[in-house]
């Protein structure tokens, strides 16, 4: 069994969560020691003792909550911030007014910064701004007026938390980009490995069947033609990876052109964008050549599917009216203002007035399947045909419609 690539996802922010998990109990101990060193100055020490007991128990009980972003819920963050704010607002009731005016610390002291940092790690700099603002208001209320020390401490917490929140957001975006790049690299290596194996076996057999069938003629020639189509489709799959899981139904009486494609795709979000190349790739064959840009041609999902359906209708007209030996070419152009798909064939062409006559007879293949679809998308479908020189259909879909 071949060894498969495995993508290892790294967590850039996990060390920050571990640091926060260590910071919270240490600062809780610091708040207790700070109170113990000035116990005799408090006017209501029992209130401070009760709060610090709750703070210590809460800190130890919620250590699993700061193990990572998944465990740190919004409900926990709200309760944690409420506990910090309660400690700040209880300080004037427990401590002496002179100590508060002289710049004494609040009951939770620097433990409050850990609560704000949890917001920063969970939601980024915006969440940090939200929590820091509440802490700033509580500190001003606790002091009675915005003093220099209060402004300094609040500004320090605000800047530090916002900076850490911004770093976390950048780290997450970088982590996702790196993980995606690793996945693409692993998929590319796997496709290259499959391409080598298929080229050494299946493709060579299909090519031999095509040559031998053409040489023998008769029913063997038809078998060779079908083998050639499958060879081209398989080469497209292993070289570009654009062909989705599909079942291509072909009518042998109509030659080598694709007549139907039944996609095996899950339900897709209509607001998402699809790569038009992936929808057109299954239509390539021995008598259908596809030329496309190297970069994805993205369109809103409904527009991409309608444009692909109009292209298929044009190919179906080639199969019906240009003959079994006709060749078709599909050209995809991605311009800033529009996406253009051109379908050209080397058939006998359409006699003048034939389209109007067919429409009068109730045959609405071009009028509805092609022009109707493009009209609904706000685009155009131009058809140029010269008897004896083939037909060219240009499908243009403007962007932003």
Image (cartoon, grey):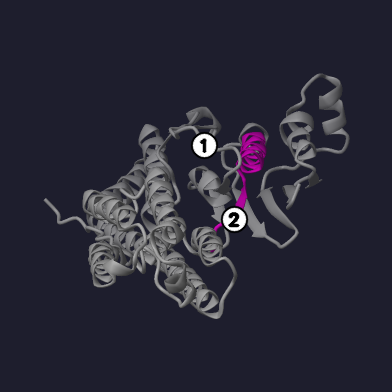
SS class of the residue under badge 2? loop
Label 2 to label 1: alpha-carbon separation: 17 Å
Q: What segment is highlighted magenta in the picture?
A: 295-317
The residue carrying pointer 1 sits among few (fewer than 14), some (14 to 19) or many (20 or more) residues within 10 Å by Cα, namely few
Residue located beneath label 1 in the image: 268
Give neighbour class at mark 2: few <14, some 14-19, many 20+ (Cα, 10 Å): some
In this view, which residue lies farthest toward the top? 362
- Nearest the viewer among 345 and 13 is 13
Question: In which quarter of the view is residue 259 placed?
Answer: top right
In what element is the residue under mark 1? loop
Locate residue 200, reporting x and y percent: 23, 57
Q: Nearer the viewer, residue 170 or 42?
A: 42
Q: Residue furthest left?
A: 1
Which residue lies at the image location 73% right of the left edge and 35% below the top edge?
A: 373
| Residue at mark 2 | 297
Q: In this rendering, does residue 241 appear at all?
A: yes
**Residue shown at 40% from the left, 43% from the top:** 75
| Residue in view at x 22 percent, y 48 percent | 61
Residue 353: % across, % down: 88, 34
Query: Is residue 214 visible to us here?
Result: no
Q: Which mark is residue 71?
A: none
Q: Is residue 297 magenta?
A: yes
The spot of residue 129 in percent (x, y) is 54, 63
Q: Looking at the image, is 144 positioned above or below residue 123?
A: below
Name the magenta segment's main secondary structure: helix
Q: Is residue 332 above or below residue 305?
A: below
Given residues 42 and 323, the one toward you in this image is: 42
Among numbered discs 2 and 1, the one appearing first in the sequence = 1
Q: Nearer the viewer, residue 140 or 133?
A: 140
């Amino acid at each position: 069994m071949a060894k498969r690539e495995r993508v290892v996802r790294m967590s850039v922010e996990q060390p920050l969560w571990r640091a926060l998990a260590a910071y919270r109990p240490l600062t809780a101990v610091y708040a207790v020691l700070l109170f113990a060193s000035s116990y005799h100055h408090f006017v209501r020490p029992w209130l401070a003792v009760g709060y610090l007991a709750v703070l210590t128990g809460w800190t130890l009980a919620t250590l699993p909550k700061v193990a990572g972003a998944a465990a740190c819920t919004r409900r926990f963050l709200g309760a944690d911030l409420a506990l910090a704010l309660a400690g700040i607002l209880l300080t004037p009731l427990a401590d002496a007014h002179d100590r508060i005016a002289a710049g004494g610390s609040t009951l939770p002291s620097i433990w409050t910064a850990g609560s704000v940092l949890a917001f920063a790690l969970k939601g980024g700099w915006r969440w940090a701004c939200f929590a820091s603002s509440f802490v700033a208001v509580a500190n001003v209320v606790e002091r009675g007026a915005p003093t220099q020390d209060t402004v300094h401490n609040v500004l320090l917490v605000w800047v530090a938390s916002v900076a850490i929140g911004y770093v976390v957001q950048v780290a997450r975006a970088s982590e996702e980009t790196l993980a995606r790049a690793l996945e693409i690299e692993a998929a590319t290596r796997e496709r290259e490995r499959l391409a080598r194996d298929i080229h050494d076996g299946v493709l060579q057999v299909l090519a031999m069947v095509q040559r031998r069938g053409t040489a023998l003629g008769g029913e063997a020639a038809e078998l060779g033609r079908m083998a050639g189509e499958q060879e081209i489709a398989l080469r497209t799959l292993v070289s570009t990876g654009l062909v989705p899981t599909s079942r291509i139904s072909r009518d042998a009486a109509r030659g080598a052109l694709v007549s139907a494609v039944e996609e095996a795709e899950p339900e897709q979000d209509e607001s998402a964008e699809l790569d038009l190349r992936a929808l057109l790739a299954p239509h390539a064959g021995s008598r259908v050549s596809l030329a496309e840009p190297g970069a994805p041609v993205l369109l809103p999902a409904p527009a991409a599917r309608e444009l692909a359906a109009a292209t298929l209708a044009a190919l179906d007209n080639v199969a019906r009216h240009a003959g079994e030996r006709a060749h078709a070419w599909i050209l995809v152009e991605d311009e800033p203002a529009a996406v253009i798909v051109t379908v050209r064939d080397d058939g006998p062409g359409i006699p003048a007035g034939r389209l109007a006559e067919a429409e009068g007879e109730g045959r609405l293949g071009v009028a509805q399947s092609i022009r109707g679809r493009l009209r609904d998308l706000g685009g155009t479908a131009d058809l140029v045909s010269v008897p004896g020189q083939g037909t060219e259909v240009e499908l243009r879909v403007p962007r932003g419609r």
